[in-house]
Image (tube, rainbow, N blue to C red):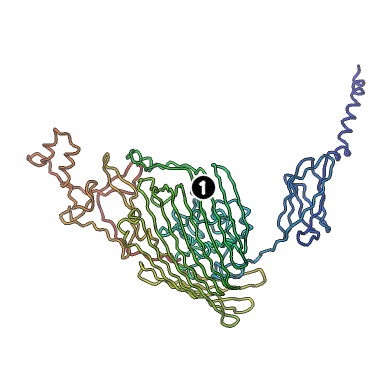
Amino acid sequence: MTRGDQYCTDAPVVLAVLALLSPANLLAQQAGIAGRVTDLETGGPVSAASVLVLGLSDQRVATDESGAFRLSVPPGTHSVLVTRIGYETSRTDGVRVGAGDTVSVAIELRSRALALNQLVVTVSRREEKELDAPASISTLTGEQLSRIIARTPADHIKTLPGVDLAATGLTQSYVVVRGFNNVSSGRLLSIVDNRYARIPALRINAINMIPTTDMDIERIELARGPGAALYGPNAAEGVMHIITASPIDKPGTTVSMGGGERSVFQLLFRSANAVSERFGIKVSGQYLRGNDWEYVDPWEVAAREATPDHPRIGVRDPINERYFADVRTDFRFSDDGEFILSGGLNNSLSSINLTSVGSAQTHDWQYRYGQARLLKGRLFAQFFVNQTHSGDNSYLLRTGDLIVDRSRTMAAQLQHGFDWGSRQRFTYGFDWQRTEPRSEGTIYGGNEDDDLLVETGAYLHSETRLGDRFDLVTALRADHHNRLTEVNLSPRAALVFRPADGHNLRLTYNQAYATPSTSALFLDIPTGRVPIAPGVGYTLRARGVPSGGLTFSDRCQGGFMGHCMRSPFLPGQLPANAGLFWDSLVEQFAPEALRRFLLEPGARPTDPALGTVFRRLNTDALGPAGGEAFPLDSGPLDLPELLPTVF
């Protein structure tokens, strides 16, 4: 057979392959999806809508004037996504198309109002357009929140401008705005429906303890910068306001369940019933469980080795588990008046939380609140109670010491406003807050019976329309703190210029302040132990600075050079004389054969004299292996009375 004969023999096969690759046969393998997009309410066509087949990025078309479209797709089952400005996104799954077939689908879009200039209440404590507000503010609507699977409200705001979020666990985090983050941060004022949401007394933003589901939230407003002129102390760096939906305006039942990495399981529900146009009731809740990230703290390891029989030192439970429930009733007694009662409970069954003295293991730590609100026209009044209960088995991991916290915060607020002519608006209000730290000596130690805080304040807010384009906003607030000697004033001024619709220029001045926290004033807690011998050591304590300042008492009559000292064998301060303990040390540690000689030092002329040498413990060098001592060269410095921090 010649080479030419071989080519002739294979020719039919080549022709057959070419026939299979012809355009007609390739088109026969394709399929199509055709349809029409209409308005759900009017039935009219929706033109210029974007139609996309998921997984096929190049298969995207726009509907024509009649709302019609056609897409070429490979055979199989597809999902069709339709989007259009002014309408809710529509997704149609399970569109099955055979080879060479064209399937017809009908898609209806629900119209949606655009909110380009939303109403906010956080900046001026009344409704105003977001662009007109004299502050930098971001708003997240309920629809935006529904697109994110979140474990706590902090997950929603972490990407907003100016926000710094430090995640410390599955649900634990610390959030600040325009400032430096730190453990146990409370600089951002967290509010839920005008109620302070921070942990009582500790003043910590434990956002994971807020008993509010995403289904409850109507919107979240985040105001950056000082807000003390209206919200009082400790709103120096911003305000996060979570506003929940009324059961009258948002009735219905919703259940959501999810899971993910680290064995996370989450169940949420909300059931709201609008009994009538004037009365509604809502119940919501959440359960979450997961395996938190594990960490080995060398301080805990060292403390555990020094005290191996202690039942709590270094004993961590990596399970993060909690549940909460929230109840709300609304009664609208008039067109511009309503009375709202709400209450909730969050129980942290198990979690590990960072503190300024090491990590703490919490079990059954509860946060509860009750709130009553009255609104009538421009009158707003409310009273609320926040309370925390640490359970019976919450403890510091480095020391194993139990933590007891049954603190409570009560607050009352009154606000009213009126217009003076067509260009002037005034808003004024009064605040009262009482904080009762209750730790049974585990947190506030010797200050337990003298740590009550009472804060009162009043403010006046003015808005003046200078013209069609200019507004002048001013405010002044005065606050009194029963542990501070002076009244604190917080002024605010802003000139707002609107060169065109949708544009806003602001020139603002704010002075805000943060009062000393309960811990800064009254803290008195053991933070660790410095071993000096097996079973013997000194306990280190962290202490606050009470009213009047802190004076170190280091003078004792009869002590070496008039100084005092402390012994691991006896409580309190003692005259600095090491010889007082010589006999006890010899009896406990010296071999019996040497005790007779050591118990009578200086009895013979050749015996060494017993004296006292001062050394100071270098706490900066403390670590898992202990610290070091160096000669005493100066005494501790007294601390003056704490003052508010001005921003």
Q: Secondary structure at mark 1?
A: loop
**Quarter holding residue 485:** bottom left
Residue that appears at 50% across and 58% down: 344
Residue lying at the far top of the rendered structure: 1
* Image quadrant where one finds the N terminus: top right
Query: Which residue occupies the foreground of this view, 38 or 503?
Result: 38
Tell me the residue at 90%/30% (across/down): 15
Q: Nearer the viewer, residue 595 or 113?
A: 113
Figure check: 639 above or below 1 = below
Q: Position of residue 211 (x, y in %)?
A: 51, 56
Decide which of 160, 410 is in the foreground and name it. 410
- 400 relative to 411 in the view: left or right: left
> What kind of residue is marked 1?
Leu
- Number of numbered discs: 1
State whether residue 149 is above or below residue 42. Answer: above
Q: In the picture provided, is 483 more to the left or to the right than 225?
A: left
Above/below status of 495 relative to 592: below
Please provide percent x and percent y for residue 142: 62, 59
In-front residue for pair 609/141? 141
The furthest residue to the front: 275
Q: Position of residue 552 (x, y in %)?
A: 27, 58
The residue located at (73%, 55%) in the rendering is 83
Q: Which residue is denoted by mark 1 in the rendering?
A: 170
Determine whether, in the image, residue 242 is placed left or right of residue 499. Answer: left
Answer few, some or many: residues within 10 Å of disc 1's Cα (few below 14, many 20 plus, some between 14 and 19): many
User: What x and y, as percent, mark residue 517?
Assistant: 40, 61
